[in-house]
Image (spheres, grey):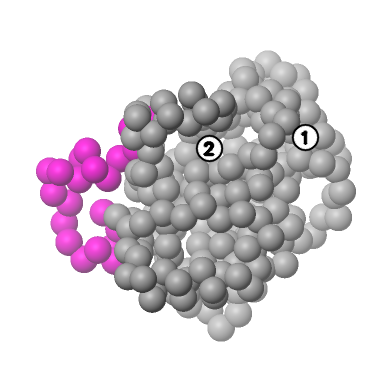
Amino acid sequence: MPPYLERESEEIDTERYQTVYSREQGSVAAPTAGLHFTPEVMGQLQRKGVALTNLTLHVGAGTFRPVKSETIADHEMHTENFRVPLETLRQLKNHKGPKVAVGTTTLRTLESLYWAGVLANQGKPFHHIEQWTPYNNAAVISFEEAVAHLIEATKKEGRTYFEGSTAIIIVPGYEVQSIKALVTNFHQPGSTLLLLVAAIVGDNWKKIYNHALNNDYRFLSYGDSSLLWKA
């Protein structure tokens, strides 16, 4: 259980603190944006023509670590591992409508896929994305082009999936490449997750969070959800 809940896990948590689409062992926590998706909700989305695709996220304990440094430049971002089937990469490359990430960890993974494709195209090691890689690279290719390069590089390795790790940090000033919107819970002050939200919606994050506070929205893992569109 997240440390900020200040309690031990209970039997009900084995069901409630888990997404309905989880499959593999490896995460230390549930990607909590996914807790809002029931089989019924997912069925409704598919009937409305929303395409769904999956990837494997191994959420790390660092997701709970607050920013304690005076500046974000001195914060050491945690590393998380992920695995994405080639078929999912193809779906991401070919999808024509807006892409929506469910959860901040999913967004970090999608952005890492972009930079992995950029690095692969540049002939550089591409299986791990460093914290500041995006800020030290002036790549200008599209998300679809980057994923196409990643598909080719993965096929050359003889794999049916891309497996990597990321320490990417997404803060205001970062240009999100992969999605048009994000489904996410409401996050605590002093967190890299709130910085990520601010990177997506700009200064509107203050308006959004003031609305949540003024209307008694629930925050954190067992809290309410939001659909945030990229500014």
Residue under the point 29% across and 55% down: 222
**Residue 121 picture quarter:** top right
Image vertical order of residue 55 relative to residue 161, above or below: below
Please state if 133 lies on the left or on the right of 83 as rendered.
Answer: right
Q: In what element is the residue under mark 2?
A: strand
- Image quadrant containing the N terminus: bottom left
Q: Nearer the viewer, residue 81 or 113?
A: 113
Please state if 216 lies on the left or on the right of 54 as rendered.
Answer: left
Q: Nearer the viewer, residue 231 or 64?
A: 231
Q: Which residue is mark 1?
A: 144
Q: Is residue 68 visible?
A: yes
Q: Which residue is mark 2?
A: 82
| Range covered by the magenta-colored residues | 1-21
Find the residue positioned furthest to the left. 11
Determine if the magenta segment contains residue 16. yes
Q: Nearer the viewer, residue 79 or 108?
A: 108
Q: Position of residue 56 (x, y in %)?
A: 48, 33
Q: In what element is the residue under mark 1?
A: helix
Please state if 18 lies on the left or on the right of 8 as rendered.
Answer: right
- What whole-number distance in Å separates the C-alpha atoms at marks 2 and 1? 19 Å
**Residue 214 picture quarter:** bottom left
Image vertical order of residue 173 relative to residue 161, above or below: below
Q: Position of residue 103 (x, y in %)?
A: 49, 48
Q: Is residue 76 visible?
A: no
The mark nearer the N terminus, 2 or 1, is: 2
Amino acid type, label 2: Phe
Determine if the magenta segment contains residue 4. yes
Crowding at dot 1, Cα within 10 Å, few <14 / some 14-19 / many 20+, comes out as some
